[in-house]
Image: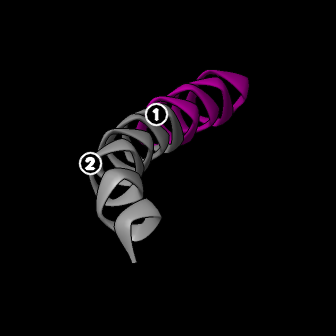
Amino acid sequence: MGGDRFYLATLSSVLWAVKWAIFTFKDKKLGRRLKKQ
């Protein structure tokens, strides 16, 4: 089923984008602390 495969690919890419956004947001906050050390 091509439809299911396309849906899963879209879902996984969206989840990856969300994880990356959260990681980048945390990294910016943590980066300030790490620079002080």
Residue at the spot x=54%, y=38% of the render? 8
Asked where in the image residue 25 lies, by quadrant, the reply is top left
The quarter of the rendered structure image containing the N terminus is top right
- Which secondary structure, mark 2? helix
- Closer to us: 16 or 24: 24
Mark toward the viewer: 2 or 1: 2
- Please state which amino acid type lies under the numbered disc 2: Lys
- Closer to us: 14 or 10: 14
Image position, residue 13 (x, y; %) = 58, 33
Asked where in the image residue 18 lies, by quadrant, the reply is top left
Note whether 24 is above or below 33 in the view shown.
above
Note whether 29 is above or below 10 in the view shown.
below
Q: Is residue 7 magenta?
A: yes
- Closer to us: 31 or 12: 31
- Please state which amino acid type lies under the numbered disc 1: Leu
Residue at the spot x=44%, y=42% of the render? 24
Note whether 1 is above or below 28 in the view shown.
above
10 Å neighbourhood of mark 2: few (<14), some, or many (≥20)? few
The dot on residue 29 is 2
10 Å neighbourhood of mark 1: few (<14), some, or many (≥20)? few
Instruction: Give the residue furthest to the right.
Output: 2
- With 21 as the anchor, is 6 left or right in this view? right
**Rounded to the nearest whole Å, what is the CA distance between mark 2 and mark 1?**
27 Å
- Closer to us: 37 or 4: 37
Residue at the spot x=36%, y=66% of the render? 36
| Range of residues picked out in magenta | 1-15
Q: Assign the magenta stretch its main secondary structure.
A: helix
Earlier sequence position, callout 2 versus callout 1: 1
The dot on residue 11 is 1
Image position, residue 29 (x, y; %) = 26, 48
